[in-house]
Amino acid sequence: MAEFNLLQSLLDTEFRPEKDVPMRRFGENAMFRVRAANTSENKRLAEQATYPEKGGGEKFDEEKFQALLIAQNCVVPAWNDPALLAGLGVSNAADAVLKRLLPGEITKLINAIHELSGFGTNHDDLKN
């Protein structure tokens, strides 16, 4: 039996796994494709969703963070597509996410992104 090689496994394992998430409200075969987030992206998105408060301190906007996370890590659909933005009357992908998706759909996509990113996941599920 071959010996397990952790170094080789680190080199061979997919960097940003992806998976399809069914979204039946948009059609029987509608699938959104999401990918794992990475650490630097998460940090940048968290900074974008943090605002200064009057009197000092900062406020973290969870809804904005979730919309940014979906916009960044949803491969299909492309939330920054100019036709989608124009059709929804918004100027950016995060606003498109908030305008088009229901709260439960947002949660469903966030959960999928978190699972792919290694939060509370059975790692066997990360294999394509």
Image: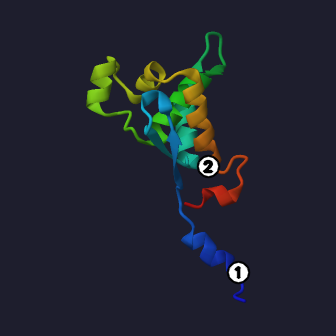
Residue at 45%, 26% (x, y): give it: 97
Residue 90 in the image: state x and y as whole percent. 35, 19
- Of residues 108 and 120, the one nearer the viewer is 108
Circle 1 residue:
4
- Of residues 24 and 84, the one nearer the viewer is 24
Q: Quick one: quadrant of the C terminus?
A: bottom right
Residue 55's place in the image compared with 75, above or below, is above
Which residue of the protein is positioned furthest toward the top in this rendering?
Answer: 54
Q: Would residue 5 be found to the left or right of residue 25 on screen?
A: right
Q: Amino acid at mark 1?
A: Phe
Q: Is residue 65 visible?
A: no
Residue 96 in the image: state x and y as whole percent. 41, 24
* Secondary structure state at the residue bearing disc 1: loop
> Label 1 crowding class (10 Å Cα cut-off): few <14, some 14-19, many 20+?
few
State the image quarter where residue 114 is shown: top right
Circle 2 residue:
117
Residue 78 in the image: state x and y as whole percent. 37, 38
Residue at 61%, 14% (x, y): give it: 53
- Of residues 23 and 127, the one nearer the viewer is 23
Residue 59 in the image: state x and y as whole percent. 63, 20
State the image quarter where residue 54 is shown: top right
Q: Amino acid at mark 2?
A: Ser
